[in-house]
Image: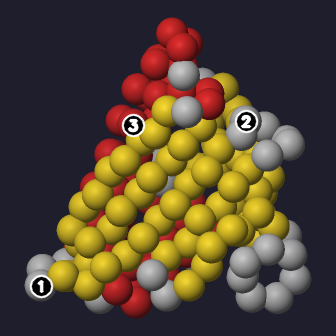
Amino acid sequence: MGDIEREIVVDGSIERVREEVMEPKNAIAWQRNLKEFEFTTPGPPAVGSECRGVLVVAGHQIDWTAKVTDWGEGGYTIRAQGLGPSFEVAWTFEAVDAGTLVRYRQSSPAFDGMTGAFIKGKVQSGVTRDLAALRERIEGA
């Protein structure tokens, strides 16, 4: 299974960065390809919570549903299976001298093969752009 891994240091508290990434309405504001994102399970998000979203990648709309497999102060992981492509996305946050180290990892069998290489390249450039937008949103505030 192919992986995309990116990291960036943001000059902001871990709490502020976590709020931007883990709150759906905030995530939509700086992730250009993310058109919809919401938790569908009542109550605060936790392990086992379900969520859904809509992405647009290379002009194609991708509707997905996922389940939270890890949730905590240090980040979260969601795993999508069923509706839409199978994938796993993990965000982690670590306090460093310069602010917060943000790590992003996405795994998907859709990144394998010749077509997968094209898709992976599009997603990688989008993630790089989105992380820069996250940094600007926090540091420019």
- Whichever of callouts 1 and 3 sits on the residue coming sooner in the sequence is 1
Going by the numbered disc 3, the residue's amino acid type is: Gln
Q: CA distance from mark 1 to mark 3?
A: 27 Å
Residue 82: x and y in percent read: 86, 43
**Horizontal side, residue 97 vs residue 130: left or right:** left
Going by the numbered disc 2, the residue's amino acid type is: Pro
Identify which residue, 70 or 126, lies in the foreground.
Answer: 70
Q: Which residue is mark 2?
A: 85
Residue 48 figure quarter: bottom right
Going by the numbered disc 1, the residue's amino acid type is: Asp
Residue 58 figure quarter: top right
Q: Residues within 10 Å of mark 1 (few under 14, many from 20)?
A: few
Q: Which residue is mark 1?
A: 97
Q: Is residue 12 visible?
A: no
Instruction: Give the secondary structure at mark 3.
Output: helix
Give above or below for 109 relative to 129: above
Residue 12: x and y in percent read: 26, 83
Tag on residue 124? Answer: 3
- Whichever of callouts 2 and 3 sits on the residue coming sooner in the sequence is 2
Give above or below for 114 relative to 93: above
Identify which residue, 55 or 103, lies in the foreground.
Answer: 103
